[in-house]
Image (cartoon, rainbow, N blue to C red):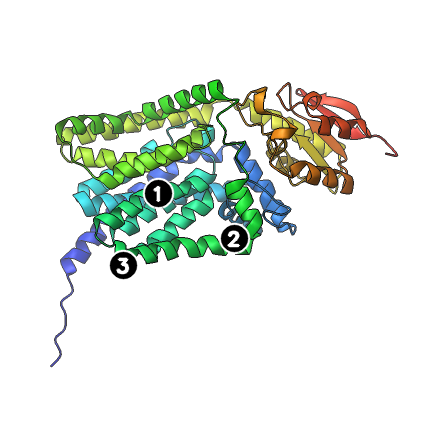
Amino acid sequence: MLAVPLVPTRSVTTRTAFWGRLLPVLAALACLTRIPSFVRPLWNPDEGYLAVQARLLAEGGRLYETVVDRKPPLLPWLYEAVFAVCGQGSLAPLRALAVLAQLLTAVLLASLARRRWGDRAGRTAGVLYLLVSVGLNPEDAQAATFEVFILPCTAAAVWCADRGRWGAAGAAVAAAFLTKQTGGAVLLPVVWLLHRQGAARAGAGRLAAGFAVPVLGAALATDPAGFLFWTVTGSAAYASFTGSEFHALVRATANTAILAGAATGLLMPIARARRIARGGSADLWLWLASSAVAVCLGFHFFGHYYLQLTAPLALLATEALQILPAQRCVSAVLTSACCCTLFLTWGLLAPRPELLHVQRIASALEQRTAPSDRVLVWGIHPETYWLADRMPATRYLTAGLLTNYSGGRDGTQVGEKYAVAGTWPVFRREMGAHRPALVVDDSRGKPYAPGRVPGLRRLLAAGYEEVGTVDGAVLYARVPGE
């Protein structure tokens, strides 16, 4: 007679009860903390860039050939897929996916904490993460852009490595990298876990294969040479610290202070516990350190870069609270909830003058051009194309790719000679092949103004005339007969 294995019903029941109670709480909290993301059509230029890329891809564009950016392909593909299903007129479906991304991240962190320290730790980690996840300028924390979608991938990588699932861990690292290059920083704690578990010989091959197969697949699905250039080798000038030292340091200080304020409820127990005990999870500290390095890469220190710090901070705080009195946990949650409320209020009430500026320009483009016309917006707001429902005359959606300008960089390394290699010959060919019906100079005194960019100045002189201004931007229309 065959023996029938006993099912550990108590374990299954306990697990079901734990998640049955926690999941609704985390889902409600994820929705609550993302409410501000739905109150504006756009939060930052990255959202606009992705929306325009998605439209170009839907029209037959080819990524890293006729549709270009310095980013990997997963998020442009996601935007394209969502637009195909839900239409191109709103980013609300992407914002809903961002809610799901944050919820998935919280669930993975709760599962990690529960496995290591018990049920209470699982609940604490999930809640603390969602409370701190909006602790930046709302245009950084509420936008449906790269870092928000990196987070579940990085959490999944550590979750899989913690359980010795090395192929899946490698695939999760690849997903993070293919969302944004800095997502690959999570490989460091994953490799540490591989070493700590003594699985280097058996697991290294699976980890490497899990990472390599998706990355090679993405390269082959696009243009391999273009993929390598635009995601790895073609951004040396952009990543330089020279020419923006003061602005970069000011931005780094400001964004570090903002996140530190938002994470007060997490940082206090971490500091307190470190004075009591010198132990701790080395993989979590490596995760935090590698994320900090990712924030620093490129020397721009934009606020959304700091989102990568929130997941390891939530777990480190949860670990610290295990050796502190119980009231410390209540204090950490209440402090984080108060900070979260302040940031949600900021997101709901703070004015967005740059969005109003872009909307005025988009309205002018709609009035002065036909839907079939191509236009050129010389600036750093690619969302103008999307809001105006007009196709760009060039694959280079911002002046930054043609001048190396980015927010905060001063004029010492801005100009044609600092552009991404090979862009100006392509730009000139595109301007000759389909001349824009309207050119918008939205430089407004910035270092990439036409007076400092001979290539654009020649374009305007060869058949365009000034026809008006909109909120500081100058409009140029083609001279009849030219």
First reached walking from the N terminus: tag 2 or tag 3? 3
Q: Position of residue 389 (x, y in %)?
A: 66, 39
The secondary element bearing badge 3 is classed as helix
Say which residue appears at 64% left-offset and 20% top-offset.
444
Front residue (pair 33, 332): 332
**Residue wearing tag 1:** 186
Q: Is residue 127 visible?
A: no
Instruction: Kindly give the residue lying farthest to the bottom in the view shown.
Output: 1
Figure check: 134 above or below 350: below
Q: Amino acid at mark 2?
A: Ala
Figure check: 66 above or below 140: below
* Alpha carbon distance from label 1 to label 2: 21 Å
Figure check: 451 above or below 12: above
**Residue wearing tag 3:** 202
Quarter of the image with the N terminus is bottom left
* Alpha carbon distance from label 2 to label 3: 27 Å
